[in-house]
Image (tube, rainbow, N blue to C red):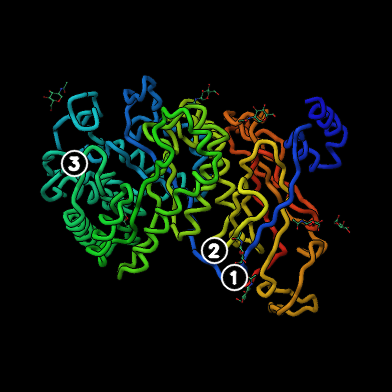
Amino acid sequence: MGQFNFQKGVCILVLFISLRCNMLDASGADDDEVVIQGRVFIDGRSAIAKIDSDFVCATMDWWPPEKCDYGTCSWGHASLLNVDLNNKIFQNAIKAFSPLKIRLGGTLQDKVVYQTENNPKPCVGFTKNTSVLFGFNDGCLPLSRWDQLSNFFRDTGAEIIFGLNALAGKTVVSGSAVGPWDSANAESLIRYTVKKNYTMYAWELGNELSGSGVGTKVAASQYAFDTMTLKNIVQEIYEGVEPKPRIIAPGGFFDANWFKEFIDKTPETLDIITHHIYNLGPGVDQHLVEKILDPSYLDGEADTFKQLQNILKTSITSASAWVGEAGGAYNSGHNLVTNAFVFSFWYLDQLGMSSVYNTKTYCRQTLIGGNYGLLNTTTFEPNPDYYSALLWHRLMGRKVLSTNFTGTKKIRAYAHCAKESKGITLLLINLDNTTRVEVNLSLNNTWIVHKLKSGHHHHHWRKGYRPRGSMIGGINSREEYHLTAKNRNLHSQVMMLNGNELTVDANDAIPPLEPVHVNSSEPISVAPYSIVFAHLPHLTLYACSN
Ligand SMILES: *[C@@H]1O[C@H](CO)[C@@H](O)[C@H](O)[C@H]1NC(C)=O
Ligand SMILES: *[C@@H]1O[C@H](CO)[C@@H](O)[C@H](O)[C@H]1NC(C)=O
Ligand SMILES: *[C@@H]1O[C@H](CO)[C@@H](O)[C@H](O)[C@H]1NC(C)=O
Ligand SMILES: *[C@@H]1O[C@H](CO)[C@@H](O)[C@H](O)[C@H]1NC(C)=O
Ligand SMILES: *[C@@H]1O[C@H](CO)[C@@H](O)[C@H](O)[C@H]1NC(C)=O
Ligand SMILES: *[C@@H]1O[C@H](CO)[C@@H](O)[C@H](O)[C@H]1NC(C)=O
Ligand SMILES: *[C@@H]1O[C@H](CO)[C@@H](O)[C@H](O)[C@H]1NC(C)=O
Ligand SMILES: *[C@@H]1O[C@H](CO)[C@@H](O)[C@H](O)[C@H]1NC(C)=O
């Protein structure tokens, strides 16, 4: 650590001359650090997938403060029914995305009753009852609270996906919920919402009732019928009303047979098919960090994305796939893992991998609440994953490029065309504790668009144009964002960007996320246990130029 402090001293001396020194400081070059070389290959010919420009989504849930897992109660006042909508950090955190998609739902959504106008019946929240499904009695959403939430979402520029109560009217018979969905209560909420001019991005039906279900399940054919009911209601209520909301289902775990049947039976109905991801196991698992740092464990999820993509490709449906809820570790996550720096390895890898398989949007469980919030449940301060999400949102464009990495399995590499900017953005994740990786870029030379300097405004691409290392980006520089954990502690809830702590300021504003500029002739240096976003503005690939 002596060297670390020495570097810090030098940094103070040259602080005003060189920002890059800070970045080196962040890496905290250790005596036992090993440097290896690696190569990222990007195919510039054509995009392999296209994500939504508002790909980043986060969830808000219904869990009351009494929701506890393994003896800890991690939800506090983070429920849709009680979260503080006047909190300035909360508002600024959402506004920073303009727009952030927010999916409202979770386990209890199927037991929510919506208050109706002129109804004298009391409308109260969830109460604990261990003898009923999901451990809580039915809860009620007051229309006054729906007004507050809707105004909050409008003011913060959020795009809302509302998960409706798919179990209404059904009878649970030995683990299966049977009978048609009673849509009357949902219909009244939708009518009220339209009357009040609250814009909805989508209405989603049900939560985790697909396949073998969680708590209970619904057969695919019945689900297709219920989804058609929702579609008909929405069509009728939104007649002459714009914009039209999308129809989303089933918000459950992927099960190939169930999903195939459901998709085949909803070709005219469904806009988006949603599935949930908790691939790390229960929050109580003591090996979450080992799993997150294991590249083959991370690769395990690719198969689900691939299978769903194949079902969609071979069906007549025009629906696209979303991850509708993903918290990694179920039962509310694990404190100091799923809300700490280390979780950005899992989260950003998931964003990258899901994009490769043409997932259009990825909803993180949660925006706030449980042990996996992007925001701290009590202080609303951003956790590390919040900043990871924001950088992704600002830098990774819609077009996904075919990318692979050689040199070490511990580097995860993803590339997209840059967002609202020229060039490409690379995302490099280093899962190794002691190895620094110097990354060179290889391109399929055929597909580089070479901009002529002669005043022509149009682009040319030249066969055989061969960029040497020092020619990539010419004499120019690129922008790099190096993310590390404070004090190299993977369990830290403080994210460092280029060596500087990220925190909200005294006015509760989200800090600017400033890059360092690096000479394009240098390899990208990825420190141990770090994440790098590199924006290469001068590298125009054929895939990104049209
Ligand atoms: C990366 O580029 C540098 C400088 O151009 C070169 O010295 C090094 O050998 C390259 N490494 C690999 C793995 O290609
Ligand atoms: C809990 O649920 C059971 C079964 O529905 C019901 O009989 C009982 O009254 C409920 N208890 C409370 C305290 O609500
Ligand atoms: C909703 O919008 C319509 C048309 O713009 C307007 O006439 C109506 O007053 C609005 N209703 C509310 C509750 O704001
Ligand atoms: C929220 O932040 C406070 C203050 O930094 C910290 O003590 C607490 O552990 C955090 N809570 C969670 C659930 O991360
Ligand atoms: C990377 O992709 C290139 C081009 O598609 C291919 O030639 C190469 O074999 C791939 N390398 C690996 C390790 O997959
Ligand atoms: C990573 O390396 C540091 C310094 O060498 C060490 O203190 C720490 O325990 C290591 N972390 C893990 C998770 O192996
Ligand atoms: C580069 O692209 C061309 C044309 O698509 C293809 O024939 C060639 O195999 C690619 N080269 C590599 C190394 O992938
Ligand atoms: C970038 O590095 C190259 C090779 O070392 C050097 O010739 C060039 O002057 C550098 N550019 C800048 C802007 O520092």
- Disc 1 residue type (three-letter): Ala
Residue located 49% across and 38% down the image: 91
Q: As shown in the figure, which amino acid type bears the numbered disc 2?
A: Lys
Q: At 28% across and 44% down in the image, what residue appears?
A: 207
Q: Is residue 297 above or below residue 440?
A: above
Q: Which residue is mark 3?
A: 117
Q: Position of residue 42 (x, y in %)?
A: 63, 63
Mark 1 and mark 2: Cα distance apart in space? 8 Å
Q: CA distance from mark 1 to mark 3?
A: 53 Å
Amino acid under disc 3: Glu
- Foreground: 94 or 256? 256
Q: Which mark is residue 399?
A: 2
Q: Which label sits in the foreground, 1 or 3?
A: 1
- Contact between labelled residues 2 and 1, with CB atoms less than 8 Å apart: yes
- Nearest the camera: 196 or 159? 159
Disc 2 residue crowd, few under 14, some 14–19, many 20+, Cα 10 Å: many
The residue indicated by pointer 1 is 543
Please identify the quadrant where the N terminus is shown: top right
